[in-house]
Image: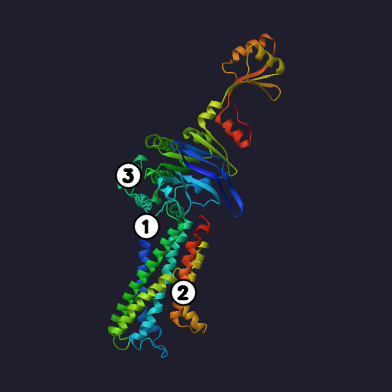
């Protein structure tokens, strides 16, 4: 499986993908400070700047941006392969389609997980450094804050990795449509905002659990039904 | 010789429409087997099923003596193929494409890659991106990919499509040499008889999704007969003279006023001499050969075999 995942990486236009990730990292690195100093600066109701433990709650939804990276990978790894017919090459190898889809989905999940985790580290460091220079968050981070952030970074990266696969079955494998895949990722990214606009009060952890399960269900259906979803 | 590829009642239905129906194909080890059929007859679909690209609706494929299914595709390791046109990751170099291919098959030998590139005169292009290749180069690169692991069977769908005359000849020579030197079995498809005829030893005729005939070229050549066609207004009398004066036994009256003489050794001069001496007017006399084309024309028209 690891070998198949490595081959997925080697088939990609790697410079394009690396460039894309760098852009995500750079933008997301500065987002927490930007929100604290510009967007929420004049809103006394927003409490993210009161302490590092509050700021962590702002850091989490920002990383949801990596759902878009997941959509981009679904496009490269599945949709483009079908459109360019290079998927036919893979189907001609002595590897079952189910295993190929598993490897592709796993590759996307691992790539999104790794990039999100690195992004957590980068934006954490950047926010801390900028706070030291500009004083945007009250107080200093405690050991408990570090621990919470580290645990949240790992669990949240997993949530994003799984949720990024939600568009895989319907839009990626079945319909093979790029734009709906991206729109689906944007909707998921904005889910906390959409829920609050709709005045739906849900514990965000429950939302994250649901979208993780949906991601897993999407992968399950993709693997299960790949033989029935048309040959090329 | 063993059948290394055999199908039983292979059928493919797409959206309720039967595209391929009950195909029983037999490819023997060492064969160059040509699938011949007009455009849209179903050759490519059959080949796609044989190479695991599409899943048959029903029927069985036995590849190297083992059933080929989605879960038992091991046989594909021993097979190379190009279906429709050679597809590559265009943004990667030729070498990267070939390396990825080899790794999927669990085979890696850089020297073998270079040697195979050399075999099709693509040496020096290994670090070029495939998008910079011409169609002919891609076709040859496709052959490299199909042959690189020295498979026992290579499946090529319309291998000369898009090639210039020199490229076509090179492709033909390459197929022959791989078959002769390495014993690689080939399954080729084409809608051009002349092309298949020059390389294939056995031919399968595909028509409207069915394999209507499987035959060895040598058998057709044996069946194929030279004949003399004679046109006269005195058909009955001529037939009588041919039988009794020239002792011919294999003659056939066609279209009422023509006689075909299939007897070996019959000469136009001798026949003319006898007929003139009996004052029979000869409206035309000509030697004919029934060609492979006649044979396949009859197949496609649903007619009888010539001979």
The residue at the point 47 percent across, 62 percent down is A223
Please give the chain letter of the residue carrying mark 1: A
Task: Give the Cα separation between the discs numbered 2 and 3.
Answer: 48 Å
The residue at the point 46 percent across, 78 percent down is A207
Q: Which mark is residue A96?
A: none
The residue at the point 41 percent across, 78 percent down is A61
Residue with the most extreme top position: B277
Query: Where in the figure is residue A88, as x and y percent of width and height?
Result: 46, 53
- Secondary structure, mark 2, is helix
Same chain for the residues at labels 1 and 2, yes or no? yes
The residue carrying pointer 1 sits among few (fewer than 14), some (14 to 19) or many (20 or more) residues within 10 Å by Cα, namely some
Whether residue B40 is visible, yes or no, is no
Whether residue A118 is visible, yes or no, is yes
- Secondary structure, mark 3, is helix
Q: How many marks?
A: 3
Q: Is residue A35 above or below residue B208?
A: below
* Relative depth, front residue between A73 and B62: B62
Q: Which mark is residue A211?
A: 2
Q: Is residue A40 left or right of residue B288?
A: left
Query: Where in the figure is residue B49, as x and y percent of width and height?
Result: 51, 48
Asked whether disc 2 touches disc 3, contact meaning CB atoms under 8 Å apart, the reply is: no
Same chain for the residues at labels 2 and 3, yes or no? no
Residue to which mark 1 is pinned: A7
Query: Where in the figure is residue A117, as x and y percent of width and height?
Result: 34, 73
Same chain for the residues at labels 1 and 3, yes or no? no
The residue carrying pointer 2 sits among few (fewer than 14), some (14 to 19) or many (20 or more) residues within 10 Å by Cα, namely many
Asked whether disc 1 touches disc 3, contact meaning CB atoms under 8 Å apart, the reply is: no
Task: Give the Cα separation between the discs numbered 1 and 3.
Answer: 20 Å
Residue to which mark 3 is pinned: B112
Please give the chain letter of the residue carrying mark 2: A
């Amino acid at each position: 499986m690891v070998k198949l995942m490595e081959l997925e990486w080697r088939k990609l236009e790697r410079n394009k993908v690396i460039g894309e990730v760098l852009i995500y990292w750079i933008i997301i690195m500065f987002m927490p400070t930007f929100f604290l100093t510009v967007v929420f600066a004049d809103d006394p109701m927003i409490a993210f700047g009161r302490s590092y433990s509050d700021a962590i709650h702002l850091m989490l939804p920002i990383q949801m941006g990596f759902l878009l990276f997941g959509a981009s990978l679904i496009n490269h790894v599945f949709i483009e392969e079908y459109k360019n017919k290079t998927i036919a090459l893979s189907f001609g190898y002595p590897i079952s389609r189910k295993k190929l889809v598993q490897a592709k989905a796993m590759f996307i999940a691992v790539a999104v997980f790794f990039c999100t985790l690195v992004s957590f580290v980068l934006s954490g460091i950047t926010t801390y450094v900028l706070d030291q220079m500009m004083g945007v968050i009250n107080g200093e981070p405690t050991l408990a804050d570090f621990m919470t952030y580290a645990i949240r970074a790992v669990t949240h990266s997993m949530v994003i990795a799984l949720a990024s696969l939600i568009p895989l079955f319907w839009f990626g494998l079945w319909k093979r449509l790029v734009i709906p895949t991206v729109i689906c990722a944007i909707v998921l990214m904005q889910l906390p905002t959409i829920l609050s606009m709709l005045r739906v009060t849900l514990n965000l952890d429950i939302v994250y659990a649901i979208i993780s399960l949906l991601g897993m269900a999407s992968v399950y259906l993709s693997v299960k039904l790949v033989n029935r979803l048309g040959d090329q | 010789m063993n059948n290394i590829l055999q199908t039983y009642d292979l059928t493919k239905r797409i959206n309720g429409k039967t595209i391929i129906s009950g195909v029983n194909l037999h490819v023997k080890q060492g064969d160059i087997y040509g699938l011949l059929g007009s455009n849209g007859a179903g050759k490519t679909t059959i080949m796609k099923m044989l190479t695991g690209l599409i899943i048959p609706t029903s029927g069985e494929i036995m590849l190297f003596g083992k059933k080929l299914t989605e879960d038992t595709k091991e046989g594909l390791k021993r097979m190379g193929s190009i279906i429709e046109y050679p597809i590559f990751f265009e943004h990667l170099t030729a070498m990267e494409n070939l390396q990825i291919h080899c790794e999927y098959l669990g085979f890696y030998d850089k020297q073998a890659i270079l040697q195979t590139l050399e075999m099709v005169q693509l040496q020096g292009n290994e670090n070029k991106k495939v998008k910079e290749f011409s169609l002919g180069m891609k076709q040859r690169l496709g052959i490299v990919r199909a042959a690189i692991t020295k498979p026992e069977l290579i499946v090529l769908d319309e291998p000369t499509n898009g090639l210039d005359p020199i490229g076509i000849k090179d492709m033909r020579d390459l197929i022959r040499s791989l078959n002769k030197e390495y014993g690689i079995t080939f399954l080729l498809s084409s809608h051009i008889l002349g092309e298949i005829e020059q390389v294939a030893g056995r031919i399968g005729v595909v028509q409207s999704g069915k394999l209507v005939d499987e035959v060895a070229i040598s058998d057709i050549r044996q069946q194929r007969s030279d004949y003399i066609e004679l046109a006269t207004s005195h058909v009955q009398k001529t037939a009588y003279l041919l039988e009794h004066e020239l002792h011919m036994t294999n003659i056939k009256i066609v279209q009422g006023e023509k006689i075909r003489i299939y007897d070996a050794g019959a000469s136009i001069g001798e026949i003319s001499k006898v007929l003139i001496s009996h004052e029979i007017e000869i409206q035309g006399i000509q030697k004919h050969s029934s060609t492979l084309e006649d044979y396949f024309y009859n197949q496609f028209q649903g007619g009888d075999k010539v001979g």
